[in-house]
Image: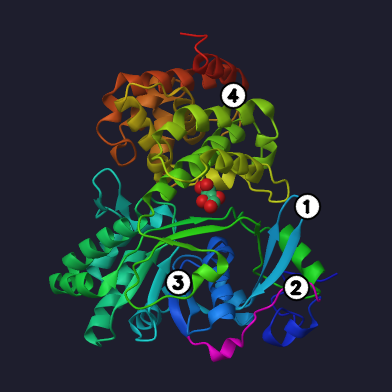
Amino acid sequence: MIDPTDSRSSNRLQAASLESLPASVVRPRYRRQEHKPGIVHLGTGAFHRAHQAVYTDTALGAEGGDWRIIGASLRSRSTCDPLNRQGGLYTVVSRDVESEEFRVIGALDRVLFAPDDPAALIDVIASADTRIVSLTVTEKGYCYNPASSSLDTANELIKSDLLRPDSPRSAPGFIVAGLQSRRRSDAGPVTVLSCDNLPDNGVITRTVVLELADRIDPELTGWIERNVSFPCSMVDRITPATTDAGRQYVADQLGCVDECPVLTESFSQWVIEDRFAAGRPAWEAGGALFVTDVAPFEKMKLRLLNGSHSAIAYLGYLAGFEYVHDVIANPPFRDLIRVMMDTEVTPTLEATDFDVDAYKDELIRRFANPNLNHQTRQIAMDGSQKLPQRLLEPISERLSEGKPIHCLALAVAAWMRYVTGQDDAGTTIDVDDPLAKDFARIRRDHAEDPAAIAEALMAIRPVFGEKLPTNPAFWNPVTESLTQLMQTGVMATFESTLKRVNGRLD
Ligand code: CS2
């Protein structure tokens, strides 16, 4: 049997081994070495490898161009060395309920580990060959405070970048240092393209970059305003973290070691604002949609897909479910999620030509895909960074129209229970979140007092802002749901929530 963790194996996925792969494996349809890099991508995790890199691979095959990708990891070394050992090659396995496709992606040129050599990353961002700098650094990577709509200057990485701008640690810090160097060498315009699940992600990126640049060198901001575009984009492909079992499966199917495969769903969507300062690959060849306004797509995806995902993750985890598909296979869960989408989220979306009902049906099918093994724990991570755009914004909009928020309030309460408490079996939860220390303090200070826990959590302004916590139409249903979750558990709370939605209670 092949050992997929054997980093010294000579039987590994490499340019030389492409020929010997099983015939069904899709390979790059272009000569890799003939295409120079034109994109620097920050955050080469599983999602980037399953999404933008795949679209770029398709674009290279269809239209060519110097658009290969230099990846950079800002925090974790884990995939850098293995991907470099493989010459940037890796496998994407796209799985539906009944189909499966193996495809080797050739778009990635190499991966830099930024903490080892920050100057190397700054240099490639500054290179005249680079025409796009894209990012998937997760919500927290932007060092953005949604409550004040500005750069979070209290963030430790930003503090460090302000002291040592030539040796940055944050994503905005690297971009600013790269743009500074680009300006000095007159390397020309460039596009900075956010591919994270944030509303107006291009606007947020522009805000943090300009604010940081202004603090470091006010003259740089004018250059950025004239030479850099920051389009918004909506990205979608459910991509669980790769497990050892996944690596073993891929090794067995390919007959060689791939230390960095990605196992994802077949579905993929990318909607991009067409505002590129220095050209772009033909991503439309892979199905990307170029539009003048991404906002309606973004809102729909963030609220219907990601909002439901967070609700499934917290409620499901508390009830003891490891995977999303197990949660959604359970009728009360599925009903609650669908009711939340239909009655509380859909009315907050702008009317478009898009068939929202078909989109929701498809979402339920995607969540139910038993071949993804998407862990509730993975989605539950970093909730403090996700809650505002996924749940709290639709809540605020509903409340401003005097509309009820039963299901959304339950989802927020489930997050509260998750970050400060125990699951229904009484096990303390290991919370992975930038605010984990604050949550631990709240748990210690307020033990099993739901009203006190809710009040203390709502006092976290970067998450809840100023207005919501003072609105009884918000804190009442949230506190009530949290109390019920703590006293009776998830299943019993569902029942009364659905009764409330149907007007049979209160
Ligand atoms: C998920 C997303 O982990 C999460 O928070 O909701 O990563 C989700 O899988 C993607 O946005 C799907 O496109």
Query: Disc 4 residue type?
Result: Val
Residue at label 3? Answer: 41
Left of 26 or right of it: where is 446? left
Residue at label 4? Answer: 490
The quadrant in which the C terminus is found is top left
Q: Label 1 to label 3, Cα distance in Å? A: 33 Å
Q: Which mark is residue 78?
A: none
Residue at horizontal 28%, vertical 64%?
A: 160
Q: Earlier in the sequence, mark 2 or mark 3?
A: 2
Residue at label 2? Answer: 25
Residue at horizontal 52%, vertical 67%?
A: 52
Query: Disc 2 residue type?
Result: Val
Q: Earlier in the sequence, mark 1 or mark 3?
A: 3
Query: Disc 3 residue type?
Result: His
Residue at label 1? Answer: 98
Q: Is residue 482 magenta?
A: no
Q: Which one is in front, 426 or 326?
A: 326
The quadrant in which the N terminus is found is bottom right
Q: Position of residue 58 (x, y in %)?
A: 58, 73
Residue sitting farthest toward the bottom: 34
